[in-house]
Structures are given as C-alpha cells and as structure tokens.
Image (cartoon, grey):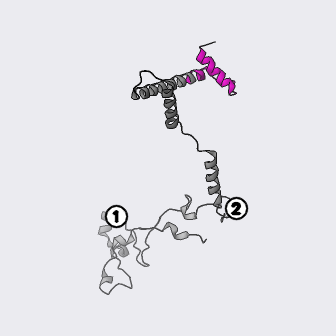
Amino acid sequence: DGPRDARIVRALLRSMGVAEYEPRVVHQFLELWYRYVVDVLTDAHVYSEHAGKAAIDPDDVKLAIQSRVNFSFSQPPPREVLLELARNRNKVPLPKSLGAPGIPLPPEQDTLISPNYQLLIPKKPAEGLEEEEEAPPNLDSISSPTHMNTAASTPKLSQDPNASGGASDLPMPQQQLTPQRVSFPLTAGKRPR
C-alpha cells in the first residue's frame, strides 16, 4: 500500500476529515515534508559546528526548528491584541450617509455621455455683399459684351459701417468668408446642485 511515509500522510489527511483527494497530493506533502526535514537538519548542523560539537544533538534540532518557525512562518497576534485593536477601531462612528437613496452618480460634466464636441460655424457675409457666380468666359461672350454679367464683373465693396472712410473703397478680403472654429467649455452646462 506504499511506503511508510505515504501511509502516514494518508492517515493525517483522514484525521483532518479529507476523504477524497488526488494521488498527487500525497506526493506533494511528501516533498514538502522531506524538504523541511533537510532544511532543519542543515540548520542544526550549522548550529552544532558553531558550538564546536562533533555531532548534532537534540538541542541543536530544537534551536533549528524554533528559528525556522520564527522566521519562516508568520504567527498571528494573540487574541487579546486582536480584540483590543477591534475595540479601538469600533470606537470611531461610521460616517452618516448624506446622499439620496440609490446609486450615486457623478456630476454630468464628468460622465462619458456628456457632449464634448466643437461646432464649426461659418462666418456669414454682410448683407448686400453676395456675389453672383460667373461662368468661365468663352470666346463668344468676349466678342459680345451684352452677354457679360456686369454685376459679377465689378468688385463689390465692403459696406461695413464701422470702417473708416478710406477703407470702405477696398474689396472685402476673401479670408473673412472662411469658416471659423468655435469651441465651448465642457463646464458651461453645469447643472445646479
């Protein structure tokens, strides 16, 4: 039914109430057991050499086990210490809930569904400054001037009332007719609290 150490591991598992397990569990426990024994005996040998002894005695093994327990396994604090820590923590009252019932939602400006776009608004030309589109001239229209649109051939002048007298005689620059990019801050539509 297997080696003696494997039977001991199976008996330990049965005594702890473990009825079903894979066969590899026994091998894992045996490996852990052997490694622990080798480490303890190696430490005991170092302690006996340090003390000037020729062989390992039970005091060296006890010292090796105690040092391994103290440095390898963390011991939980005593029950009294845990109870005192719990009493100190429970003295502080819980904060009162100030929010409305339900799930608290973030402010609208912090959500992913809030509008975060920019509008592109073209600048409107002043009234009366609209120019008519002129078709490309062909040779026939050059010979007969009656077919030419005289409104399109003369440049339109700026009718800006704020402009000075000399500046109103100049044609309107083309760059003012290009669309302008306008942006709004995301916090402009804050809802009241």
Q: Secondary structure at mark 2?
A: loop
Judge whether residue 14 is colored magenta. Answer: yes
The residue identified by callout 2 is: 101
Amino acid type at image mark 2: Pro
Q: Position of residue 101 (x, y in %)?
A: 70, 61
Quadrant location of the N terminus in the rendered image: top right
Categorize mark 1 by other alpha carbons within 10 Å: few (<14), some (14-19), many (20+).
few
Counting from the top left corner in percent of width and height, residue 70 is at 51, 37
Q: Nearer the viewer, residue 108 or 95?
A: 95
Front-most of residues 134 and 147: 134
Q: Which quadrant is the C terminus positioned in?
A: bottom right
Q: Which residue is mark 1?
A: 136
Asked if 165 appears above or below 151 in the picture, the reply is below
Please give the name of the residue rendered at 33% of the width and 74% of the height, measured from the top-left corner. 173
Q: Position of residue 96 (x, y in %)?
A: 66, 64
Write the residue at 34% across / 76% down.
172
Q: Nearer the viewer, mark 1 or mark 2?
A: 2
Q: From this viewpoint, is residue 80 visible? A: yes
Magenta residues, start to end: 1-28
Residue type highlighted by circle 1:
Pro
For residue 181, the mark is none
Mark 1 or mark 2: which comes first in sequence?
Answer: 2
